[in-house]
Image (cartoon, grey):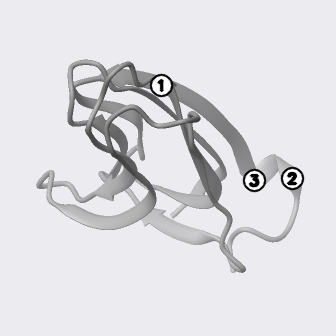
Amino acid sequence: MRFFGPRSNRTQIFLEVGVTNGTAIVYTVPADKLLYLIEASLHLTSVNPATGLAEVSVRNAADEHVRDLCSIDIGSNPPFVPTDHFEPAYFVEVPAGYDIVVTSSAASLAAEGDIFGFLVKA
């Protein structure tokens, strides 16, 4: 497996992006690279009042949804601001050209998505 071996063969990726009522790209895997995704998280920064869905997910090169990582479906006037965390037992391989995105489906639903992983040569 390409992940193991000298540390000089991989680059650490830790990014965060926020969005309200739309989609924002957290990271696009560059050509000839492979991202080993170790964890992702999603937290809401504003929900007053909001009903909607926020998520962190993976899209392929054709911008088609291929995998959910974190998801929060919120009803009106929640008593707290929820979070979701994705930490697989074994890291997820995300190929070149794929995006990790954060989405929000409501104008008053502000969401932030974080990712952590390592980029290696494919």
Q: CA distance from mark 3 to mark 1?
A: 26 Å
Q: Position of residue 109 (x, y in %)?
A: 33, 26
- Say which label, 3 or 1, has the lower sequence index: 3
Along the horizontal axis of the image, is 5 left or right of 115?
right
Residue sitting at x 69%, y 80%? 1
- Please name the amino acid that badge 2 sits on: Arg
Q: Nearer the viewer, residue 58 or 82?
A: 82
Residue situated in front as seen by the camera: 49 or 12? 49
Q: Quadrant of residue 60?
A: bottom left
Label 3–label 1 contact, CB within 8 A: no
The crowding category of the residue bearing disc 3, from other C-alpha atoms within 10 Å (few below 14, some 14 to 19, many at least 20), is few
Q: Give the distance between the C-alpha atoms of the residues marked 2 and 3, in whole angstroms.
A: 5 Å
Q: Nearer the viewer, residue 74 or 54?
A: 74
Q: Which mark is residue 9?
A: 3
- Confirm or deny contact between disc 2 and disc 1 (CB under 8 A): no
Secondary structure type for disc 2 = helix
Considering depth in this image, is 11 or 16 the residue closer to the camera? 16
Labels 2 & 3 near each other (Cβ < 8 A)? yes
User: Which of the two labelled residues, at mark 2 and mark 1, occupies the earlier sequence position?
Assistant: 2
Q: In the rendered picture of this protein, how many numbered marks are placed on residues?
A: 3
Residue 77 left/right relative to 36: left
